[in-house]
Image (cartoon, helix red, strand yellow):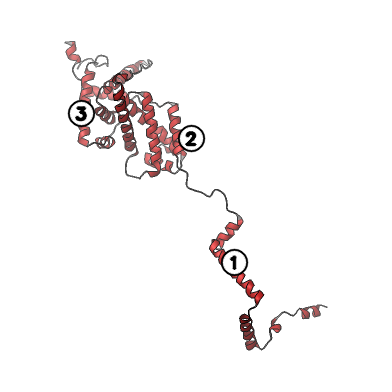
Amino acid sequence: MVMALDALSDVPDEALLIAYGNGDRDAARALTLRLTPRVLGYAARVLSDRAEAEDVAQEAMLRLWRQAPKWRQGEAKVTTWLYRVVANLCTDRLRKARGQDLESVPEPEDDAPGAEAGLQQAARAQALEDALRALPDRQRQAVILRHLEGFTNPEIAEVMDIGVEAVESLTARGKRALAASLGGRRAELGYEDG
Amino acid sequence: MADKAEMTPLGEDDLDALFNAARARPAEPSVALYERVLADAEAAMPAPAARPAHRRGLAARLLSQVGGWPAATGLAAAAAIGVYIGMAAPSAVETMSGGYVASTSGYGMEDLMVSYAGLMGSGG
């Protein structure tokens, strides 16, 4: 399996998806290992709930498997299509959660202390995730896609089903809000002065 | 005064450092999640390109050599008609063939047949 996956590491997502659609199990394994961490990471940041994010990741991957036989080559990027599914699933869950209990968002887990050098990095990452959680849903999604997932603005527009200008507006407002809320944690994050 | 400093928004570089720190901590799916995703992939996997489930028998392969069932029914019909003509010997056929041979060679039909009596005589 390791050799087969090594051999597939340079194969584009779309080629693997088509191979899976033709019954190739190695392609399924390669896509699972490549895409599951990405969709899980995105969903976890948007939802701030690991268990919910795992469910979303599994559901999104299942939809990808079902789409494989119908996949039309060159029409869309696999990751853009998949993130769009994740974004919609997350939006549905956030709407439902909002209807239930706003205070039930779980507190971030305390990571076990790691190496000294990694502590500040972990603290910074955690602080960012806390601040992201306070953003409105659409701003949070746009900022995550742009600055953590590395998507371009036109790709984000496709994922979120909005215009490029709306993406620019959302990411700009989101970043301003993050900068403002994190300004109060400057010392904690190792930024001694402004 | 310290409060005022703390309320100053983070600069672009500081914010980028936070994004870098978060990117350095990618989500690690659990083994259970990988297994669930792979199980779904297995269950949803389309069947590979169709192949015959088993080899065809000798009769089927011979049949395919002569053109399949339509050709075989034609051959059977022709054979049946041949047997019928041989057995029934309709007068039209006998007249035509007999007349033709007689008029062109001057020999009777029996002259064209192998003479087993001659063979037996020469051997003994």
Mark toward the start of the polypeptide (3 vs 2) = 2
- Give the Cα distance between marks 1 and 3: 84 Å
Q: Is residue A12 visible?
A: no
For disc 2, the marked residue is A1
**Mark 3 in CB contact with mark 2 (< 8 angstroms):** no
Q: How far across and down, in percent of the image, does residue B36 sit?
A: 44, 31
Q: Which chain does tag 2 point to?
A: A
For disc 3, the marked residue is A172
Amino acid type indicated by mark 3 = Ala
**Mark 2 in CB contact with mark 1 (< 8 angstroms):** no
Name the quarter where the C terminus of chain B is drawn: bottom right
Q: Is residue B31 left or right of residue B87?
A: left
- Give the Cα distance between marks 2 and 1: 56 Å
SS at circle 2 = loop
SS at circle 1 = helix
**Mark 3 neighbour class, 10 Å CA radius: few under 14, some 14 to 19, many 20 or more:** some
**Mark 1 neighbour class, 10 Å CA radius: few under 14, some 14 to 19, many 20 or more:** few
Res. B12 mark: none
Amino acid type indicated by mark 2 = Met
Image quadrant assignment for residue A171: top left
Q: Which chain does tag 3 point to?
A: A
SS at circle 3 = helix
Residue at 19% across, 16% down: B7
For disc 1, the marked residue is B76
Image quadrant assignment for residue B121: bottom right
Q: Is residue A11 above or below residue B62?
A: above
Q: How far across and down, in percent of the image, does residue B81 sit?
A: 60, 72
